[in-house]
Structures are given as C-alpha cells and as structure tokens.
Image (cartoon, rainbow, N blue to C red):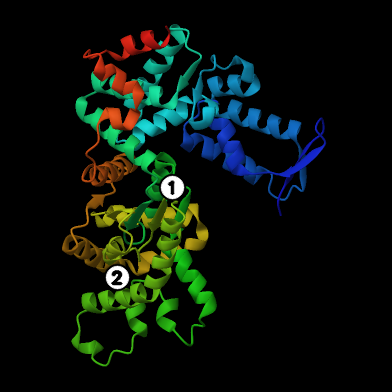
Amino acid sequence: MKTIVFNEPENTRVPFLRGILIRSLLDTGLPFEKAFEMASAVRDELSGTPEVSSRDLRDRVIRGLEKRGFAEALELYRSPSAAPARILVRGPGERANAFSRGRHERFLQASGMRPEKAEAVTGMIFDQLLASGITSISTSELGYLTYLCVQQEVSKRAAERYLVWMEFEQSGRPLVVMICGAVGTGKSTIATEVAHLLDVVRIQSTDMLREVMRMMIPQRLLPVLHASSFNAWKFLPIQDKEDRGREQLIADGYRSQVGLLQVACEAAVQRAVEESVPIILEGVHAHPDLLELGSKHPEALMVHVTLAVLRPKELKSRLRGRGKQVPHRRAKRYLNKFDAIWSLQSFLLSEADRCEVPIITNQEKERSILQIILQVNQELGRHFSGTPQEVFGDSAAQDEESGERKTWRQFVRDLSG
C-alpha cells in the first residue's frame, strides 16, 4: 500500500516516493549512500500508514537527520534559503538549472576521479565562480573550466579522462555495462553504485529475467530453469553423469541456464540500445559471450567485467551477511552448497579469462567501483580522437586561437568580464 502525502496549503495528494526524498537529501549535501539510507528508513517508518501530511513527513526527516548527526544537512533541509548563493548553468536552448555540487562531483567520478579529489575540484571551481561574482555560466564554459582545473590541479591524465567522458556524454551513444559473478560477490550492490555515478537509470538483473521465465514455464516442463545456477546440472538429461567430474557438471548446468536466458538478456539490451538508454545488466548469467552483442549493436559501447571474491572465508562471510540483511535469501542454503558455488566461481573466472574480460576482485567496494568506472573510460578512450575544441566548442576554441594557455582562474576572470 502506497502512503499518500497530503499537502494542506496546496490541497494536493501525491504518493510518497523514496526517490524524490533521496533527491531532496542529496541537495543538502548528503552523499548518495547516506541519502539512500535515510530515505529508506523514512519509507519503512511510513509502512502501513495510508496518509501523512507534508508537515509530518518533513518533521520525520528532520528527526532522522538529527538522530544521525547530519548537522549541516539538517540546517539546509530546515532552511533552504540558507543554502549557498546560486549559480545558474545554461544548457541548450537557454534552459538553466542551479549549479549542483553533487552532480558535478559525480560527473568527475564518472571520469575515474576518486571521490575526495572530485569533491576538492568541485569546491575550488564553485568557490572561484562565487568569488568572481559569476551568477550564470553555460554548460560548455563550465565543462572547459573543469577541464582546465583538472589538468592543472590534478593531472593531464585525469583531464584526458574527463574530456573522453564529456565527449561520450554528448555523443548520445548508449552504454551497456555487464557485471557477472557468482552468488555473494556483490554484483547488485556494485551495480547500484556504478549506476548512480554514471547516471544509468536502468539496471536489469538476470535473476529477475529468470524469475519472469519461471512464472511463464512450469517447473515440470523445464526443471533446469527452476534450479539454482550452481546445481542446475542435477536436472540435465545427461546419461554419463558418473563419468563426468563435478566441476564439469556444474559448468554444464550453468551453461544450460545461460542458453535459456540468452534471448531475454539480448532483448533487454536491444530495447535499451534502441531507446539510447544506458543499461547495466548484472547477474550470474551475464556471461562473457554476451559481448558478441556488440557486433549486432556497433553504435553501443559494451563493457563487461566479472566480479570475484578470491578468499573462501570472505565469500562465506558475505553469504552469512546476505542472510542477516535479507532473510528470504536463505544464507544457510548457500553455505550448505558452498563447494558448488566456489566451483562455479572458478568456472566463471576461467570463462572471463578465455574471453579476455577484466576480473575485478571485490575486496573493497569503493575500489571495485572505481575499477569499473576506469574500465568504462578505458573502453571509451579506444574510440576517442577528439580535442577540447571539438568537445567544448567556442569556449576552448577562443582560448586556442589566442595562442595563450590560460589557467583556469584566468578563464574565470575572463568570464566575469
């Protein structure tokens, strides 16, 4: 049941949406992870409540911010007017939006910059614009200013990655990121974080595709589809099971499921490409062979990685954690079948090696996210041959024509007149 938010002054009723609250919290400066946690807590608190006033909802959020000690975010949430001075960023067609520090930082992170460095660069640029009295700037001017700042304050390599990402953003080409890995390797968590940074609005789980197919096809007709990926072999019509090794049987069962799901995976990717919408396809069935889709969709950028947890104790610990966080995942069942899961992971890693797909050891979440982002940028770099003038237009062209290599602060002074 959806909770309805009643706004008495405006006499409106709208459903409570966690995503809207997350956006409001991001505007106060909270990082995505904290904003997501806060909004989820409010949603859970409202569970079973048919209606809540906008004033009551606001009070609940304020109490949540107070409880968690987010003093700065609390001040901005209570008094939006206390927010820093606004700088308008003019987009195509003179459409203007307020400069968003969070969005600017995420854009830098999407080019492969570490969060702390991205925050510092965004802070320098915003402070310099404010100090110069600039209240409006075009997207191309902001892009070129950021490029100069990164080049001079971080490194030329980081600036090149930013240039490559900017060019791709303007190209309109669809991005397809595929994340494979055995159960417990963190695919869903990593996919969600990467989607946030790359502004990907569509995440497709192969588990969900399999669940849809299970609803359509009864177990008695196709039992292998209804099994887990690591024990699907038990339902294969194999005559010589006794003569095959356990690892081979697990691989055969997994491959049979991949074959059944391949059409559904291809359909999800094809729809995204046709709509020019970026997509992340994640799951154990996101097999490296799906990279062959690239030949069918040359206009799309295809990036594939395989996640791995290479220490048995750590993988077991993650499986136990899954049971605590989401009880219906039945961690005990996974732990009882741990040897089969470990064998399946070994097979997935050998398949990644065979298909020359990067293997990312997911020991630290932030590091794994960064490695995937860098992999995307590396793939983009293979197809990039542009220049700042081509990417940023007149903003960079005038700088080049003058024959003067300006600093980013000089560029800001020029903008201020």
Quadrant showing the N terminus: bottom right
- In the rendered view, does 5 fall on the left or right side of 221? right
Residue 291, compared with residue 262, is above or below; it is above
Q: Pick whichever, 67 or 104, lies toward us.
A: 104
Which residue was labeled with disc 1?
Answer: 192
Whether residue 322 is visible? yes
| Residue 373: % across, % down | 31, 42
Secondary structure state at the residue bearing disc 1: helix
The local secondary structure at tag 2 comes to helix
Crowding at dot 2, Cα within 10 Å, few <14 / some 14-19 / many 20+, comes out as some
Count of numbered marks: 2
Label drawn at residue 319: none
Question: Circle 1: is it few (<14), some (14-19), or many (20+) Cα within 10 Å?
Answer: some
Q: Residue at x 18, y 58 (%)?
A: 356
Who's the residue at 59% across and 21% down the image?
A: 76
Q: Are marks 1 and 2 in contact (CB under 8 Å)?
A: no
Left or right: 210 in relation to 384: right
The amino acid at mark 2 is Ala
Q: Position of residue 375 (x, y in %)?
A: 26, 45
Q: Looking at the image, is 84 positioned above or below residue 292?
A: above
Q: Tell me what residue is drawn at x 36 percent, y 77 percent.
A: 232
Please name whichever residue, 375 or 312, is drawn nearer the observer in this view of the structure.
375
Residue type indicated by callout 1: Thr
Depth check: 359 or 400 in front?
A: 400
Query: To which residue does mark 2 refer?
Result: 340
